[in-house]
Image: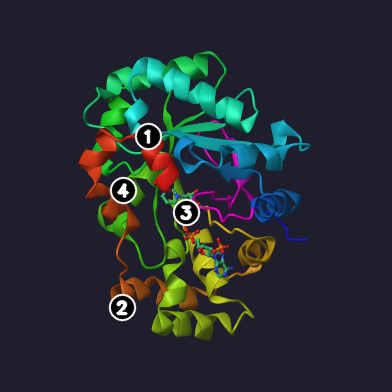
Amino acid sequence: MIYMEMKEFNKTGNKISVIGVGTWQLSDDREGNINSIRYAIDQKVNFIDTAEIYNTEDIVGEAIKGYDRGSLFIASKVWPAHFRYDDVIKACGGSLSRIGTKYLDLYQLHWPNKAIHIEETMKAMEKLVDDGKIKNIGVSNFSLEDLKEVQGAMKKYEIASNQVEYNIVTRDIEASGLFDYCRENHIAIIAYSPLSHGKIFGNKSLLNDLQRIGSRYNASPAQVALAWLLERDNTFPIPKASNAEHMKEDLKAIDIKLSKEDLDSLSKLDSKYHMESIAKQHVERSDKINSYDFKKEKTEQ
Ligand SMILES: NC(=O)c1ccc[n+]([C@@H]2O[C@H](COP(=O)([O-])OP(=O)(O)OC[C@H]3O[C@@H](n4cnc5c(N)ncnc54)[C@H](OP(=O)(O)O)[C@@H]3O)[C@@H](O)[C@H]2O)c1
């Protein structure tokens, strides 16, 4: 059994597990995915992330059946094509019914959408809080500028988190000042693609570096990459693992306490191996994001 640490998520003192479970592009093995999520919950991970576009909300719903809902922290996301007021309310209803829950702990705007006034979207998000359908409002893939804009559009509540790409070799949020701004303003960073979307396993030289450091802790490359993120302030990594074996390995990262010397040398790896950002590839398609054919996208992912 892993000793699961809990960490403050927002200003109101909500605590969630320091590591969460990602559910984008799960494998076709439905049972394996469900077992993997259940394994994590049994290890006291309470934070599970999904999105209306992932086509995995029902899997999350099935996985959490039988667990105490109040002890879990379930996050989903509304796709930018649904940012008009009525569409936000409807999309949330859809997520609630697919997950089989009365409320979400965190509801996030998946990507910015410049084609719809952010005030309209945030009015709907705040209404969802008032109606008890969601407990916290978050954003995802919001730049520093986008984040300040959305904060300015809120009347009653505050942004609790920004879910962004962040891992040992993709550190754009540090360079842009987003990391510091979030820390200073108590906006949690939810680090997506913490294993670089699996790309760290495809780079032999990087893998060797991680293995070399990991050998001092009896830790795998995945565990070293996650342990580095777990040491970052205000940061909650959400690795995706389609089977319980990978999940088990990933969660054990919590027990690894890297020395200051190793943390420092790991922090320098990005200058050696900066990886093509997944978020950037999406931004290049941002025109498409604003006018997505939602049904088509759903089958593509
Ligand atoms: N907000 C956004 O726009 C956005 C974008 C991307 C991701 N996300 C969120 O972040 C989550 C995680 O990111 P991600 O799915 O892109 O990638 P990731 O967690 O960085 O990497 C997942 C990949 O690593 C593999 N893996 C996991 N643990 C492993 C281990 N111990 N050893 C070897 N391979 C291992 C997985 O394989 P298996 O599946 O075979 O276990 C999968 O191929 C997503 O699921 C989603 O919830 C959000």
Q: Is residue 41 left or right of residue 179?
A: right
Q: Is residue 72 above or below residue 154?
A: below
User: Which quadrant would residue 120 be assigned to in this image?
Assistant: top left
Please rate how many residues cluster around mark 1, counting C-alpha atoms within 10 Å: few if below 14, some from 14 to 19, many from 20: some
Most frequent secondary structure within the magenta stretch: loop
**Where 138 falls versus 197 (above or below)?**
above
Which label sits in the foreground, 3 or 2?
A: 2
Q: CA distance from mark 1 to mark 3?
A: 35 Å
Give the labeled residue for mark 2: 272
Query: Mark 1 or mark 3, which is nearer to you?
Result: 1
Q: Magenta residues, as a range?
A: 6-29
Query: In the image, what residue type sits under mark 2?
Result: Lys
Q: CA distance from mark 2 to mark 1?
A: 38 Å
Q: Is residue 290 above or below residue 164?
A: above
Along the line of sight, the residue nearer the viewer: 32 or 135: 32
Determine which residue is flagged by label 3.
233
Residue beneath the point at 25% across and 53% down: 176
Residue at 46%, 85% in the rendered image: 208
- Look at mark 1 in the image and give the residue it sits on: 294
Residue at 47% of width from left, 60% of height from top? 194
